[in-house]
Amino acid sequence: MAINFPIKKKVEHKAANKANLGMELEDMINQSNEYYLVNNKAVIHKKPTPIQIVKVDYPNRNMAKIVEAYYKTPSTTDYNGIYKGKYIDFEAKENHNKTAFPLRNIHPHQIEHLRKIIEHGGIGFLIIAWNLYNEYYLVPMDIVFEYWDKAELDDGRKSIPYSVFKEKAHPIKVGYVPRLNYLSVVDEVYF
Amino acid sequence: MAINFPIKKKVEHKAANKANLGMELEDMINQSNEYYLVNNKAVIHKKPTPIQIVKVDYPNRNMAKIVEAYYKTPSTTDYNGIYKGKYIDFEAKENHNKTAFPLRNIHPHQIEHLRKIIEHGGIGFLIIAWNLYNEYYLVPMDIVFEYWDKAELDDGRKSIPYSVFKEKAHPIKVGYVPRLNYLSVVDEVYF
């Protein structure tokens, strides 16, 4: 399934996130994963963006040029890997709101995927950046499922309030290297 | 890094693999993974193909059309996931040769990735299809490392002979559903 692409998102965010020297959440996580990999702490990678390829040209014998393709809805999360022998899986999102994180930012497939990961004994969570506050949280899936399932039931408010982050989620410290030391929070929460 | 794309590969293979009703190894594994997922046996997915996007057009406000992109060298393997609480990671390749599997079919990054996975307590292997014989093997990484490291050392024959598959690798049965029941081999070898 092809999806709409949020054209303006990047521009808004670059402006809002000045305190992080314009570094996006994805870059922060990728840099941290690189640090974990090089230091032999964990092997966690971002999955490539799923693309539906429609047309490929061959300008010469050894070259393939994709000339028509579209973004697809991801069927899993963006990040997975292994840490201390455990399977680890998460999705990372930036939030530009003031008071709540809207759950429409997460695809239903991704929620179902994380549900299965936990059933099978893996570690699953969300990393949410609050861009206006420069705050980063690891959110265990039980909190997410609670709000997700409630929303499904009464078609009510599909979001997790900021107050819930403050009370129940786990803040992740921003540093230099690794930029976002989320594994130290994983240690506290899961080990 | 952009890579050359094997233009003719698909055509050759379709002809060689008639006994499997033309089903490619990737499709066989994807179908098996779908079976494992639906039956709650494991959560294993193929990663999307990594693409370097160069140019995107916006024919209208809500549509993004990629008009220039190239295939990239993968930095990890194609498949990973969780099975019986363990992290599992593998690469799958078809082999059209008669007497050996040429190791140039595997990228050095992928070998290094699998080395790290095993160091961190994960399960890593290759699935190799011998198209001429309609045989499928699970090859534990210690066998692959042996031939890979030897080849690196003396710049010699960078391949694993068919005889080694017969002696040391583990045949995977082809069935109807799941098409390629590789997890039953994982059970025997790793559990």
Image (spheres, coloured by chain):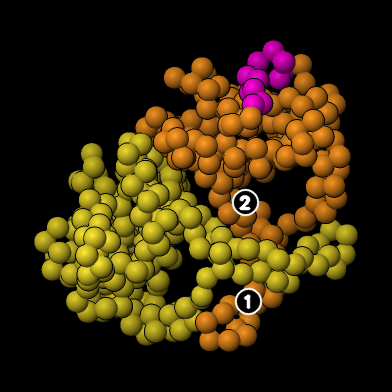
Chain colours: A yellow, B orange
Residue in the foreground of this view, choosing between A152 and B185: A152
Q: Image point 64% across, 26% down: which residue? A: B175
Query: In the picture shown, does residue B166 fall above or below B49?
Result: above
| Residue B110 visible within the image | yes
Residue in the foreground of this view, choosing between A84 and B32: B32
Q: Position of residue B47 (x, y in %)?
A: 55, 50
Secondary element at tag 2: loop
The residue where tag 2 is placed is: B74
Graded by Cα atoms within 10 Å as few (under 14), some (14 to 19) or many (20 or more), the crowding at tag 1 reads some
For badge 2, the amino acid type reads: Pro
Residue in the foreground of this view, choosing between B173 and B105: B173
Query: In the picture shown, does residue B29 fall above or below B62?
Result: above
The part of the image, by quadrant, that contains residue B28 is: top right
Residue in the foreground of this view, choosing between B102 and A40: B102
Which chain contains the residue that carries disc 1?
Answer: B
Graded by Cα atoms within 10 Å as few (under 14), some (14 to 19) or many (20 or more), the crowding at tag 2 reads some
Q: In which quarter of the image is the N terminus of chain A?
A: bottom right
Q: In which quarter of the image is the C terminus of chain A?
A: top left
Q: Position of residue B12 (x, y in %)?
A: 86, 43
Q: Image point 72% across, 31% down: which residue? A: B129
The residue where tag 1 is placed is: B65
Provide the residue span drawn in magenta.
B164-175
Query: In the picture shown, does residue B155 fall above or below A70?
Result: above
